[in-house]
Amino acid sequence: MTNSEIAAMLYEFAELTDLEGDVFKRNAYRRAAQSIEELDGDVAEYDREGRLESIPGVGKAIAQKIAEMVETGRSAKLEELRSKFPPGIVELMKVPEIGPRSLVRLHQELGIKDLEDLRQAALQHRIRSLKGFGERSEENILKGIAVVQGQGGRMLLGDALPIAEAIAAHLRAGGCEEVSVAGSLRRRKETIGDIDLLAGSDEPLRAMDRFVSYPRVASVVSRGPTRSTVRLADGTQVDLRVVPRDSYGAALQYFTGSKEHNVVMRRIAIQKGFRLNEYGLHRRDSGEMVAGAQEAEIYRTLGLDPIPPELREGRGEIEAAGEHRLPSLLRLEDIRGDMHVHTVMSDGRATMREIAEAAFRRGYEYIGVTDHSRSLHIAHGLTVDDLLASVEEARQLTDELGFPVLRGAEVDILEDGSLDYPDEALAQLDYVIGSVHSRFKMDRRTMTERVMTALSNRELNILGHPTGRLIGRREGYDIDIEQVMDEAARRGVALEVNGFPDRMDLSDLNCRKAIERGVTLVLDTDAHGVEQLDNMRFAVGTARRGWAERKDVLNALPLDQLRRFFRVAGA
DNA sequence: GCCGTTTTCGGCCCGACTGTTTTCAGTCG
Ligand SMILES: Nc1nc2c(ncn2[C@H]2C[C@H](O)[C@@H](COP(=O)(O)OP(=O)(O)OP(=O)(O)O)O2)c(=O)[nH]1
Ligand SMILES: [Mg+2]
Ligand SMILES: [Mg+2]
Ligand SMILES: [Zn+2]
């Protein structure tokens, strides 16, 4: 069983325990599940070595359950819990506004077993007969069912951020003094559940009016003096929180999350004799507010170094902040050039010249252009002759513009691990990215072997989108990514952090793992048009979430050092 | 169920909004 399969079972324990009525036990299962999900290394290994209880949130009882799962693939206790509820409960738990308490009563008192039962009960007005439910409850349930059935899961960061920024601009134009994007967007998570915005205003009602009057708002889910929730026409949920300006920093801390980060922060506040909420940090005894306007002050007053939003996931950042060992994170300004950009020669929309000019305008010091290789017919992969001709074109352009245009290629890693051009042709290029674009369904050993073979090619400098996942569409291929990381580190091959919003590959956690293993990262966009050069901010966000510093990143180096990396690679 | 520089028992983050309530439980952020 994989870590994520075990984590999924623990999350299921959490949900079922919630139905049983014990929220503390639920939280305990969730914490353990998150630990397993993000564990560096195989849980089965922890089990074999008797180290399960060293995992945060895993004690005797959960360790025993994990051991059973690892050894048998099942959990007797989980099956017993499942049998207490109908299978349709899984769907029912997704209905907004219906929580565990309502669900148990709907099941016990009305015999509701699945979404269709619930819909019928609401339509036939049978729900209002329950104590505590009424007409509005039935309406909300019907709306909730429509939401579950209509929703397409989480959005991509790249889709959500522009929407959020547009609404923020709408609020500013309406007189809100301070507006920030908060929640998972501010943390630059690769997928976004909803859009969270914060406004600091001494006229909260005006801010709320402005918010719900945004043209794309389709319905108002809830509306109060400090918080409102709306739904846009496409179903996207947007939350706005409004606080007095004195509380802006504390509110930003709260609303940026993550929830897990907040819970730890508030626990530390308690330990140090404070109370922390979205209005400020207060002394417990006197109630005196000691920080609130500035977010960084909340952290400092608790004895912590201010923590960048991208790190706030409850992954050890608070402990690190207390010991003054937070990383000095990479910044967008540290990136000196993009390294993965397609031109019109293959499946891009811009010419080499247009890309070079756009790169220069962005303030880059160099640009790398890369087209697909000959086997990738659907993307108009280049023949050897076209590739070599483009090397000359890059050279001329460099001279003409006085701006270094590096000619690379995104070369297919073929089924046997060889690269899709002869070595003599590759040697003519400034650098080579190797990517898997075909035959994804190999077994783990074969796929790992395939990529290891590619890494052993001395012409290879960068491994492109190393896991091959497409968010929301395709799992990454089955590969031993740790082994690949170790080999890449040993051979001086950089691993890509592809900032295309549905790739984000390496992911945040894989970046962190790679850095710990001594891998050099390269951040790029995989742009197919010059406007997509903006995706660099997503690559940077992901790398920051992976605790990356400037020194970990190849294209944060000046040109001469970049070239040196390419020369010594494979040596 | 987990956990411990004040504890091995008794806590476990804290607040807004809704609907149905006659004082608050449930759900969500
Ligand atoms: N203290 C505290 N803060 C919470 C809790 N739930 C949510 N928050 C804060 C932190 C979250 O980042 C922020 C926004 O909530 P969301 O539910 O939108 O979560 P978030 O944006 O992190 O993830 P998402 O992508 O929307 O699923 O509100 C909670 O239970 N306690
Ligand atoms: Mg959110
Ligand atoms: Mg939200
Ligand atoms: Zn590719």
Image (cartoon, rainbow, N blue to C red):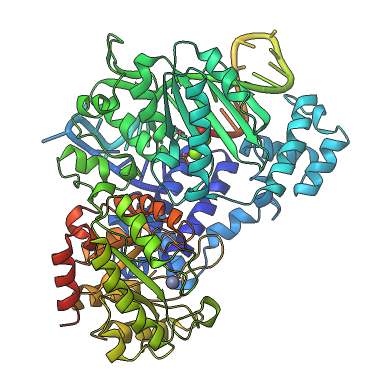
User: Foreground: A341 or A141?
Assistant: A341
Residue A12 position within the rendered picture, expressed as x and y whole percent measured from the top left: 54, 53
Give the tally of numbered discs: 0
In which quadrant is the C terminus of chain A drawn? Answer: bottom left
- Residue in view at x 45 percent, y 48 percent: A29
Residue A128 position within the rendered picture, expressed as x and y whole percent measured from the top left: 81, 28
Residue A215 position within the rendered picture, expressed as x and y whole percent measured from the top left: 64, 30
In the image, residue A360 sits, relative to residue A456, either above or below, namely above
User: Foreground: B18 or A363?
Assistant: A363
User: Foreground: A313 or A426?
Assistant: A426
In which quadrant is the N terminus of chain A drawn? Answer: bottom left
Whether residue A168 sits left or right of residue A92 in the image: it is left
In the image, residue A494 sits, relative to residue B8, either above or below, namely below
Residue placed farthest to the right in the image?
A124
User: Foreground: A323 or A268?
Assistant: A323
- Residue in view at x 32 percent, y 60 percent: A338
- Residue in view at x 28 percent, y 72 percent: A396
In the image, residue A151 sits, relative to residue A37, either above or below, namely above
Residue placed farthest to the front in the image?
A400
Whether residue A340 sits left or right of residue A364 in the image: it is right
Residue A111 visible? The answer is: no
Residue A555 visible? The answer is: yes
Residue A232 position within the rendered picture, expressed as x and y whole percent measured from the top left: 64, 36
